[in-house]
Amino acid sequence: MMTSRRIWLAGSLLSVFCLSAYSQTDVSSGFQIGIGATNILDTYLSQEKFRGTGMTLLATSERQKPGSRWVTTLQHELNFASADDRVETVNELQGDYTFFYGRYYSMPLGRLTLQAGAVGALNLGFIYNTSNSNNPAQGRLSLNIMPSATADYVFPLFRLPWTVRYEVELPLAGVMFSPNYGQSYYEIFSQGNYDHNIVPVTFATAPNFRQTLSLGCRVNRSTTLRLGYLGDYQQARVNNLKSHIYHHRLMIGFVRHFTISPRP
């Protein structure tokens, strides 16, 4: 019986591989780098707001099969920032990585293409207060489901095709890690004192919001140069603690377009 199950499983995996190998797919793969302002508040570490400058690396991939209305997107966003308090005597360092997986239904309308769907966002990060001797760091871990939409408008200029693109992700629901008010990480991880540290969140308690606006120029058949703005606003009010991280970035980069063809 166990051997039969293993054979069935191996056959199923082989079928999936063969179907993917013989399916043509249009791919757009991009990379952008950005710099701009960051605003940080985490009352677990300090009641102060910190402002500074940060950098973002963004890698994107969009896949669509010819004739299909469904689009799959993958995004990897890496942020790092250094910020100071109002009198510039205390510094905080912030970093995070977010993986986005999205599925959209595409609706072409002439020059305009609309997409509607949802994105799953897994975020892992930290905030480090360089002046705190007790509880100097705050870990960040969350998983959110976010309704999303995009709009692309293509127009000719200087005999080249240009595209204006707007993308937005809105909060819905998810879960996040958070210490409780007055609880130390030593209590959580060394003594095992759980105190509502895995918290369900909604758009009311964690109203995260993300948007991008960009202008792209198709310089040849396979490459688009892109300039734009990324706004990533992460905020939460849980366990009697309040936090926010606002990123404003001027982004620049490129997108490569190619087709994965069926194997001969």
Image: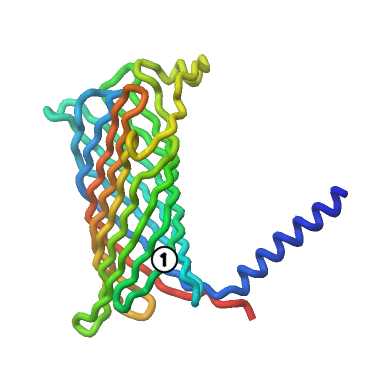
Q: Position of residue 92 (x, y in %)?
A: 26, 31
Residue at mark 1? 29
Residue under the point 47% across and 73% down: 26
Quadrant of residue 4 within the rendered picture: bottom right
Q: Position of residue 57 (x, y in %)?
A: 34, 52
216 vs 119: above or below: below
Q: How is the image coloured?
A: rainbow
Check disc 1: other Cα within 10 Å, few if <14, some if 14-19, many if 20+.
some
Residue under the point 52% across and 17% down: 192
Q: On the rendered structure, is 113 left or right of 22?
A: left
Residue under the point 37% across and 80% down: 221
Q: Position of residue 196 (x, y in %)?
A: 45, 23
Q: Which residue reaches farthest left?
A: 87
Q: On the rendered structure, is 24 left or right of 169?
A: right
77 vs 67: above or below: above
Q: Position of residue 188 (x, y in %)?
A: 47, 19
Identify the image quadrant of the C terminus: bottom right
Q: Which residue reaches farthest bottom?
A: 159
Residue under the point 34% across and 37% down: 206
Q: On the rendered structure, is 174 left or right of 94?
A: right
Please name the amino acid that badge 1 sits on: Ser
